[in-house]
Image (cartoon, rainbow, N blue to C red):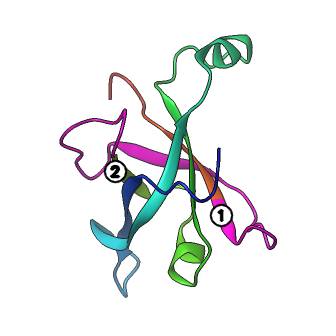
Amino acid sequence: MQSGQMRHRVKIWRRQVSEDGDRGDYVLLYSSRANAKALNAAKMVEAGLAESGSRILLRIRDCAPARLIDIGCRASVEGPGMAAAPAPGDYEVENVNAPDARMRTIDFVLVQKQGG
């Protein structure tokens, strides 16, 4: 994956939390260009993750709003090889890697659960 090729458009939603602790609807947290790459399905089967849906490695530029993204946020990805009409919740952030200081990027693993 080359960091200079940001050919995809990503939108990240985060669940709102009210003052009394109740969770509300998802609100748009961050929108940016990104590089998305589908992870190898054969490796997922070997790891025992065959019941899960597709996984995507997402790389975005490091910035303050990007550091607010955490596990449980929802994402949609537009671009080459992705769904034509993404909607909030197409993917869920499953893993957040530490920022890469040299490349100034952050990598995320997105998963699309199948069947609910």
Q: Which mark is residue 76?
A: 2
Q: Residues within 10 Å of mark 2 (few under 14, many from 20)?
A: many
In this rendered view, identify the residue nearer to me: 51 or 107. 107
Q: Residue furthest bottom?
A: 19
Q: Which residues are magenta?
A: 79-106
Label 1 element class: strand
In this rendered view, identify the residue nearer to me: 15 or 4. 4
In this rendered view, identify the residue nearer to me: 1 or 65. 1
Label 2 element class: strand
x then y, percent, for residue 65: 50, 80
x then y, percent, for residue 64: 57, 84
Please, is residue 87 above or below residue 112 in the view?
below
Image quadrant assignment for residue 24: bottom left
Q: Main secondary structure of the magenta part?
A: loop
Image quadrant assignment for residue 9: bottom left
Please, is residue 45 above or below residue 9 in the view?
above
Image quadrant assignment for residue 68: bottom right
Q: Is residue 47 left or right of residue 17?
A: right
**Residue 19 colored in magenta in the image:** no
C-alpha distance separating marks 1 and 2: 17 Å
User: Which residue is at a point 73% across and 11% down the rendered structure image?
Assistant: 46
Mark 2 residue type: Ser
- Count up the numbered dots: 2
Please, is residue 19 above or below residue 26 in the view?
below
User: Which residue is at a point 42% across and 52% down the rendered structure image?
Assistant: 7
x then y, percent, for residue 69: 53, 68
Q: Which mark is residue 106?
A: 1
Image quarter (top left, top right, bottom left or bottom right) of the C terminus:
top left
User: Which residue is at a point 36% across and 48% down the rendered structure image?
Assistant: 77
Mark 1 residue type: Ile
